[in-house]
Amino acid sequence: MATLELASRSHDQAGPATLTIFFAKPPDSASAISSPPSSASTTQSAPTSDHTPFERTETIDMKHRHESEILSDLMGLTKATSVVATPEEEAELQALADEKKRSELDRQRNAVYTEQKRQEKALLDQARGAIGAA
């Protein structure tokens, strides 16, 4: 079992960019049910009282590397396997992509409509100003 921890997040682009993977010993069936381990942490904090010692740690240098290379290294270290989407999940992903396209078209139409209303209001305000000045 591997626990991922992002050791440090900073805006220092010159500093190291490492991903640390903590490999924990397989939990007992009783303790696994009572307190499942945290799968990810984005802060550096002291271990909790139910802290499980780590079997080993591995790090991946992420500096100037493409995300696919990092993922490949991560999957190799953790012996992870890719999961193929089911037909239902593929259909759901397609539906989400279609909805995103419709939303973009709606945003564009709304922007055109809003611009037309703004121009009409500007013309009306200009006409009202001209009538008031005469």
Image: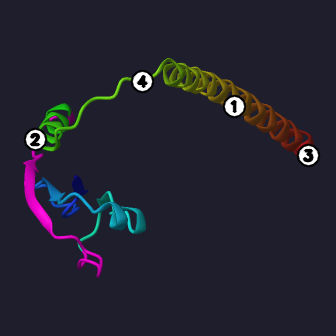
Which region is colored magenta? 45-67
Q: Is residue 103 left or right of residue 5?
A: right
Left or right? Give the position of 35 relative to 10: right
Residue that mark 1 sits on: 115
Q: Secondary structure at mark 2?
A: loop
Disc nearer the start of the sequence (4/2): 2
- The quadrant in which residue 102 appears is top right
- SS at circle 4: loop
Q: Is residue 53 magenta?
A: yes
State the residue position of label 3.
Answer: 132
Type of the residue with mark 2: His
Sequence order check, earlier mark of 4 and 3: 4
Disc 1 marks which amino acid?
Glu
How is this picture coloured?
rainbow
Look at the numbered discs 2 and 3 and tell me whether their residues touch, using CB distance below 8 Å: no
Residue at screen point 16% across, 43% down: 78
Question: Residue 129, relative to residue 123: is it above or below?
Answer: below
Q: Secondary structure at mark 3?
A: helix
Residue 126 appears at what percent x and percent y? 80, 38
- Name the amino acid type tagged 4: Ala
Res 54 quadrant in image: bottom left
Q: Earlier in the sequence, mark 1 or mark 2?
A: 2
Looking at the image, is mark 2 or mark 3 earlier in the sequence?
2
Check disc 4 and report the residue beneath it. Answer: 85
Sequence-first disc among 1 and 4: 4
In this view, the residue farthest toward the bottom is: 49
For disc 2, the marked residue is 64
Is 71 situated left or right of 50 in this image?
A: left
Indicate whether 50 appears above or below 114: below
Residue 50 vs residue 88, the one in the foreground: 50
Q: Residue at x 22, y 70 (%)?
A: 52
